[in-house]
Image (cartoon, helix red, strand yellow):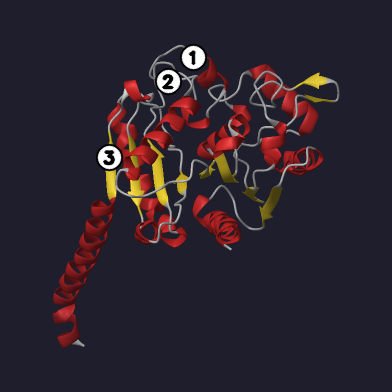
Amino acid sequence: MRLFRRHIPVIAIALIAITASIIAIVLGLFAARVRHVSADANAGFHADYYVYVSPGARRLARESRIVTLLVQPNNSGTNSDDPNVHRDDAWWTTFGRSGIADHLNVVLLVPAFIRPATDWRIYTHALDRDALLTERNDLKRLDLQLMAMIDHARTTLAREGMQIDERVLIQGFSASGMFANRFTALHPDRVKAAAVGSPGGWPIAPVATYSGEDLPYPAGVSNVSFDAAAFRDVPQMFVMGALDDNDSLDFRDGWDEEPARQIDRLFGDTPLKRWPRAESLYREAGANAKFMLIDGVGHDRRKLQRHSTDFFREVLQREWR
């Protein structure tokens, strides 16, 4: 026993060295496949973005096949006027989702939009009402800025012999799930499939009115251009933990008080109560949408991610047949 104890420090040092080596290898492989693209106002986007090219995407390109882009909106979870805060978070998000890109053989794109502290009501990472209405050049119409990033990445990769589909997969959880959901409603013609995790207590309703009341964005689509036919064609999956009580309607950065109260009154005052109501609205609108409620899970992205990944794999497999 004494001999074993004497060797514990040596074993610990060896394990640390092995772990550090593995981390270095993983980070090295990632660094070789990721690229940082700086903001380019002339190209239509005022924030940086990251692109990760999976080995499978390279293989598909060599086989002269069309490659799919997976968009993961960034969600730093904090307000800051410092772009570096959001760039760092977007880099780590790209690293964290790179395994999904590897699994699906896709190219991953992560924007680095800021979530401002000065204009804190503009909840950019959720693509809220203020994000559509603001006249701040750097934050104006982030949905269009994201499309400009997508097209910029497609053009850049095309020069390298990689043809990228103009329709993207888009996924998100919590605020980024709200962004993914709302982007799909605004631009269904650019979305191949959307996976939305715990969208802040309420996914945008694909209808303009309910019970005789207008549902303005982001409660519904009464005051935005909405292509209902294109939206119905987009496969969508919504997933939430049955224990999730994270409700963005309780906070004034993401919702004005009046529309938040309207949703509470019409559809229920908790995310769980609203879930079947949202599902019914999507079904009645003819949307190709699947709603999943996972027992024993709260507001936990990691425990729900596999459902999004499996959903995207099924979409891609149908397309490749």
Find residue 114 and report its image quarter: top left
Image position of 290 with respect to 82: above or below: below
Closer to us: 277 or 264: 277
Q: Residues within 10 Å of mark 3 (few under 14, many from 20)?
A: some
Q: Are marks 1 and 2 in contact (CB under 8 Å)?
A: yes
Image position of 225 with respect to 179: above or below: above
Residue 292 % position (x, y): 68, 53
Secondary structure, mark 1, is: loop
Q: In the drawing, what numbered circle is on residue 36? A: 3
Label 3, label 1: how far apart the Cα atoms are = 27 Å
Residue 311 % position (x, y): 59, 56
Q: In the drawing, what numbered circle is on residue 134? A: 1
Q: Residues within 10 Å of mark 2 (few under 14, many from 20)?
A: many
Label 2 vs 3, first from the N-terminus: 3
What residue is shown with label 2?
139
Q: Residue at x 17, y 68 (%)?
A: 17
